[in-house]
Image (spheres, helix red, strand yellow):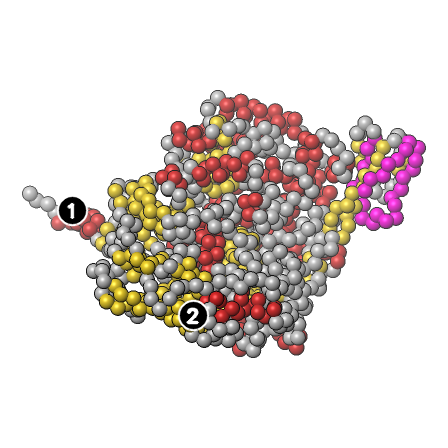
Amino acid sequence: MNIKPFLLLPVFFLFFTCCQTESVSWPEPTSEVKPWTRWWWPGNAVDRENIRRELKEMAKAGIGGVEITSIYGVKGEEDRFIEYLTPEFSDMVQFTIEEAHKLGMGVDLPPGSGWRCGGPFVPEEKGLWSLKMHRFDLKAGETWEMPEGIENAAALSFVNERGEATVLAPEESFAVPEAGRIYVAERIKNHDKVKRASDGGKGWAIDTFNEEITGWYLNEFWKRLGIDEGLLRCFFHDSFEYSGDFTTHFTEEFEKRRGYNLAKYLHILAGDCEDSDLIARVKSDYRQTLSDLVLESFIQPMTDWTHSHRSLNRNQAHGSPGNILDLYAACDIPETEIFRTVEPGTANIFVNKFASSSAHVTGQKLVSSESFTWLNDHWTVTTSEMMRATNRFFLAGVNHIFFHGTCYSPDDAEWPGWLFYASTQMNNRNPLWREMPALFKYIERSQSILQQTNPKSDLLVYWPYYDVTASEGRLFNNLNIDKGDNAGWFSDTPFAKTVKSLSDFGYTFDYISDKQLGNCQMLNGRIVTEGKAEYKVVVVPPVKYIPTGTMKKLVDFMAGGGKVFFDESLPESVPGMLHFEEREKQLNEIKAGIESVKQVGNVTGLLAKANVPGEKSLVEKGFHFLKVEKDGEEWYWILNAGMNELDEWVELNARAKSYLLYFPETGEMAQAENEGNSVHLQLEPERAVFVRCTAKKVNVPAYNYFDRNKESREIKGMWKITFVEGGPVFPGDISMEELVSWTELGDSETSRFAGTANYSVEFEWNESATSGLLDLGNVKNCARVRLNGNDYGTLLGPSFKIDVDNLQQGKNLLEVEVTNVAANRIRDLDKRGVDWKKFYDINFVNIDYKPFDAAAWEVKEAGLQGPVLLTGQ
């Protein structure tokens, strides 16, 4: 046989490729995969030496960047204050950026002090406006003139007793032809000012509904900032906390956008109407106009402005009176937040998914989070709570964690240093800072994968924003996030019910707005978004109001072979007032065509019939998860969000030759036990693992599963306790046979000590096994483990179990360094009346925004309380 050698090359290459063994590793960390922190500068009272010191401390611990936020100052430190936006302030910002870049860190900055755009150079007339409605009862034959107290009448109408409205000119007198009412819409000054600002940053907040004012303000801010372009990675805008609901040209914008004169319906705005449908339509148009103006006059211009200065826009859309999907999408890095405590065993992440959905749909790579805001009261937040909140962010699609946060404090400030009122105190005065590198590394490893993968969701779920705009309540319908999934605009809505049902059946999904849906295309039966993300199905929840344009787009998808399913029912009507009868007729014609194709019903049943499966096994076994894709391979991020260990075989939809386990908490990588696409998972509460589904040969060991049927033994002996780090005073050494809180033993200092204590015990091990599972039991609040001199790292909780592999027959030495929260130390300060709360503005509040006083707190348990169990393997 005469075979030419070059014909063998492709066969040889294929054989060589298939037989290659891949060495696996975690991606190389960058500054963006590390966690960042909001770095408050009280009174901008910073200096070069302390800036350099704090940046080095943060970089060494594993923080990748800072967001400088200028806030109110510290009483008694006025001589250190630097006025905001002065040349001296600019020098400090420039110096910080240079020092941060030397350390491989990035820097972000808000376009204003505190939050809200504004300041002392903003004149009152460029500030926010609100709507005030007036009504005047009149009799036939009276002559009405504008009362002297009304200065800025924006619209005027007369409504007779039959409900017929006549639009009036504000500057003219009016001869009343018959009994009725005159309604006046007055534009009044809103009193919003910059919140929590430093000296030089206080002043009026700008009118966010006026594009000209937005551009003017940002340009004035840039001129005063006085730093080089391109040095700041991002400008950051905090949650929308402006309360204005009107502007100088609102009535003109309303008529231009909605197609009719708002003055005809002032009686509705005044609450003098009983027609619920009419009320809903006018309110919807009013709120939609506010939404349009926030997007087009504020967020989009801000993004364009940041780009013009070679930076990006990081923005929190929540809190705005607008379509937050479109607002999140209008920036470069959408940011969500969790406000207050995350209850153990819960996974309420649906509201947080608005930010990540916009990023996925439009192709933005980073989704950030304001993390740990009021996670608990000051100095009581545990590492377990931090882990729980971090995992909820990842589950919601966040891949760029920002702590809330770190307060600058000079080295000479007495403990607890300078503080911000709503912080988890992510700083070096918190005794938990000693163990924070373990949390930072967990976040870094997780984000190194999450930022390099593409989200892989099955479904797009249409968000019926027009149902929100037509809802009852005040005109300024801000979409707050502080209550999470219990937010009034989300909870108990048909949309919430649909997405919860989909989640319960193991479906992954993103939300999509009307605008974003209009930018989608069909490709090979898939819906492809403007960001090139592909989805199998569009799900429409029960909807009352939907634009005909959106319905036509959905019909186009169906005509092109795409799957569109309506959960339970078709939309009822169209939004808004103008020609709504005509538009409703068009909608009904569209609906008639859809009803015949059997795409309306129970959505999970429709998906099953269409052979679109969810990850049913994962959810049935109690896991929560994400699905992503990297280099053609499917990955899962799987979390045990419950309160008990999960040891289960799960059947994954992704079929592969090997299933690799990447544990971000420890850095361990191993081969999972599998039978086909059934994979064995063991996860303690709040433990997560990446599962990589690959056809490649990989060079990793098999995962060491723990046999739960083996008997454990309690480690007993004389525990020696030595206090090694913390304050205010080191207690004396303690010895105990029965583990209890260190606050119950020793001298008087134990009840107020905050810091780290070393627990050591010698124990006999007579089994042949050299490895085992160590369970520390109850720990207050985190622990670092050493066995026979080998360091096994930090356990952050809530589970304090770890594999050990250096047990030796005979004597063994176990050392556990336990660090507690600072609550007992801060309690001691308040009991002794020490004056440490010395901050301007909001000084100093607890989680309920009442004056903070820890004097009445009970002493919190501290230390290792066990029982400490060891199970040989």
Q: Residue at x 40, y 48 (%)?
A: 644
Q: Position of residue 214 (x, y in %)?
A: 65, 55
Amino acid under disc 1: Leu
**Mark found first going from the N terminus, 1 or 2:** 1
Q: Nearer the viewer, residue 734 or 488?
A: 734
Q: Is 530 on the left or on the right of 173, as rendered? A: left
Q: Is 523 on the left or on the right of 213, as rendered? A: left
Q: Position of residue 851 (x, y in %)?
A: 65, 61
Q: Residue furthest left?
A: 1
Q: Residue furthest front?
A: 737
Decide: few, some or many residues near mark 2? Use Cα within 10 Å; few <14, some 14-19, many ≥20: many
Q: Position of residue 749 (x, y in %)?
A: 51, 73
Q: Nearer the viewer, residue 482 or 129?
A: 482
Amino acid under disc 2: Ala
The image's mark for residue 435 is: none
Q: Residue at x 86, y 36 (%)?
A: 137
The image's mark for residue 7 is: 1
**Contact (Cβ within 8 Å) of mark 1 with mark 2:** no
781 lies above or below 187: below
Asked if residue 691 is among those painted magenta in the image, a careful observer would answer: no
Asked if residue 138 is among those painted magenta in the image, a careful observer would answer: yes
Q: Secondary structure at mark 2?
A: strand
Please identify the quadrant where the C terminus is shown: bottom left
Is residue 105 shown to the viewer in this render? Answer: no
108 lies above or below 450: below
Residue located beneath label 2 in the image: 757
